[in-house]
Image (cartoon, rainbow, N blue to C red):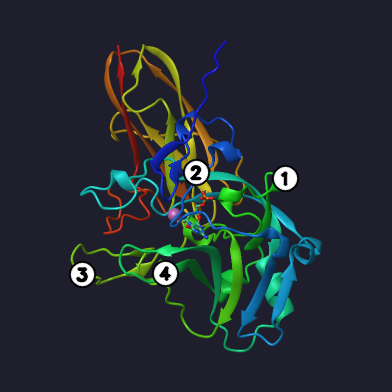
Amino acid sequence: MNLSKPYLTTRSLQPENQETPIQFIKNNIISERLFFRRNHFSYPNLTYSSYWLPVNGHVRNPQLFSLQNIMSLPSKALTVVLECAGNKRSFFEPKVFGEQWEKGAISQGVWKGVPLKTLLQLAHIKEGALEVVVEGYDVGKRTDTDKVYSYARSLPIEKALHEDTLVAYEYNGGPIPFKHGFPLRLIVPQWYGMASVKWVKQITIVNRAFSGPFQTVDYVYYPKKDSDEGATPVTTMRVNSSIKKPLDREILTTGVHEINGIAWTGKGLIVKVEISTDSGQTWTEVKLRNKDQYSWIDWSYDWEVAEKGEYTILSKATDSHGRVQRKEPYWNRKGYGYNGIDRIKVKVE
Ligand SMILES: Nc1nc2c(c(=O)[nH]1)N[C@H]1C(S)=C(S)[C@@H](COP(=O)(O)O)O[C@H]1N2
Ligand SMILES: [Mo]
């Protein structure tokens, strides 16, 4: 009997940042126990007996929704991959500061809720609305100032009105687990995880660009080390793939081994995953499974290896917008959006 089971990998305890042991996960619907946790502050103190969600700002009919109101509106359930923009940060060369995530700042499951669009329509957005600001209940100090901030992010109005941008209240068929945003969490398919605000406190429609620090200081690509020149906001996920099996530096015997992993993108669908077992000299297209609109796909390849030696195995995904993983990731000072071709090394003896 084998009783061993995977646990989260701890990156920091306060605030709590833990990654999913993606290499050991077979199921594509991640349970609460193994869902990565990414927090900027301590968990909020909420009193649920009086939970109301205001939708206000640049609107004609400001609203105050009860949870019951929200749950009585037409809902939808979507399987969505959430990837932290800092996923794989530890692989950047030269290295960058920030949580040193490996491959596990990513998870997915089924989120159910009401489209944000429905709430915005009930509030009657006024002409000239530019962005929708979503604020969480968690607050704290940042390292760069003494001011206290809440975690808040904005979405451009088009993305806020997208029919699959949800104010979610269920995860995998139950209430959203507390650490993942109970009772209400924004879910923004195709964008990096920072957009999916947990513990939603307030939704405000604005007619100018929102400039909170999680919008204009963090979650910005800074291509230069010493200046902010060329800064662009972090939004949709880049095309990406991860090898789950074998493990990096695993020792194998000659014979047939399954190489498997996942691939995902924030634009369109994954259309191709290629594997190389000879450091990139030759590539083979592999089998793809379950192409769902917003979820990762599984891929696998049976590798027959007859000769002993060391092998570098690579995986490279292509999406339906023709975006392909490159060998060199796009280096940026804060280490977001790493999507270099995935690489492991094994020894066959
Ligand atoms: N309120 C709030 N929402 C938040 C965050 C946060 O710190 N506070 N972190 C964001 C980031 S950067 C990511 S990657 C995801 C992580 O979600 P999880 O902790 O459920 O995995 O939540 C996002 N939403
Ligand atoms: Mo993140």
Nearest to viewer (mark 4 / mark 2)? 4
Q: Say if mark 3 contacts mark 4, CB within 8 Å.
A: no
- Between the residue at mark 3 and the residue at mark 2, the CA separation in whole angstroms equals 32 Å
Q: Looking at the image, which residue sits at the far left?
A: 226
Write down the residue under mark 1: 173
Write down the residue under mark 2: 36
Query: Disc 2 residue type?
Result: Phe
Q: Which mark is residue 35?
A: none
Secondary structure of the residue carrying tag 1 is: loop
How crowded pointer 1 is (Cα within 10 Å; few <14, some 14-19, many 20+) is rated as: few
262 is higher (above) or lower (below) than 301: below
N-term mark: 3 or 2: 2
Which quadrant would residue 284 be assigned to in this image? top left
The percent coordinates of residue 275 (x first, y second) are: 40, 34
Write down the residue under mark 4: 148
N-term mark: 1 or 2: 2
